[in-house]
Image: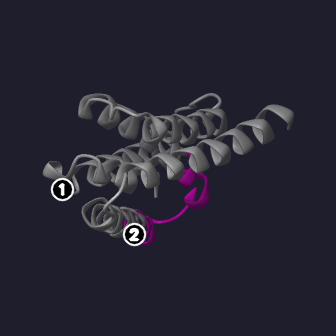
Amino acid sequence: VAVGLLAALKPQLGILLPVIFAIATIGGTGIHLLGINLPAAETAIAFSILAFGIMLALKNTPNFLWIALGAALAGIFHGYAYGEAIIGAEMSPLLSYLTGFALIQIGVASVVCLSAQFVLKNVPENPNLYLRFAGFTICGIGAAFLSSVVLA
């Protein structure tokens, strides 16, 4: 959802950001399946949610390169966590799983992006304020996840 909202801030780039995130999640799953350990993956995921919320809440939109880098890093850690669900699977279910979650991520982020772009175009007063409030909400979600990781 956060990736779709961030993509709405850069409409000229279409669904590039959701695609970057989805490809990175596949890479993260591959890292997990290769047996490479990414330490503190849950902490990195919580920080990525918090960072996406901050990027949305800022008055000035960050440069696309920073957003894309954040999406790629977050995608790697999210994908790494997804990899735990398919350890030991054979090739056919594995490919189906990877294809399915990549397409679902791109689909959800694209719908969120298009919805946010609609709001940005059709709300007469301070349309960016809605995305900033969404950013504050996502910050809260990220902080809650981070606290659960730290306190666990």
Q: Is residue 97 magenta?
A: yes
Q: Amino acid at mark 1?
A: Gly
Can residue 38 be seen here? The reply is yes
Residue furthest front in the image? 125
Q: Residue at x 37, y 51 (%)?
A: 126
Q: Are marks 2 and 1 in contact (CB under 8 Å)?
A: no
Residue furthest left in the image? 12
Q: Quadrant of the C terminus?
A: top right
Q: Position of residue 38 (x, y in %)?
A: 56, 31
Q: Position of residue 143 (x, y in %)?
A: 69, 39
Res 104 label: 2
Q: Position of residue 28 (x, y in %)?
A: 44, 43
Q: How is the image coloured?
A: one colour
Res 14 label: 1
Residue furthest right in the image? 151
- Foreground mark, 2 or 1? 1
Question: Which stretch did the figure color magenta?
Answer: 81-98
- Which numbered disc, 2 or 1, marks the residue that appears first in the sequence? 1
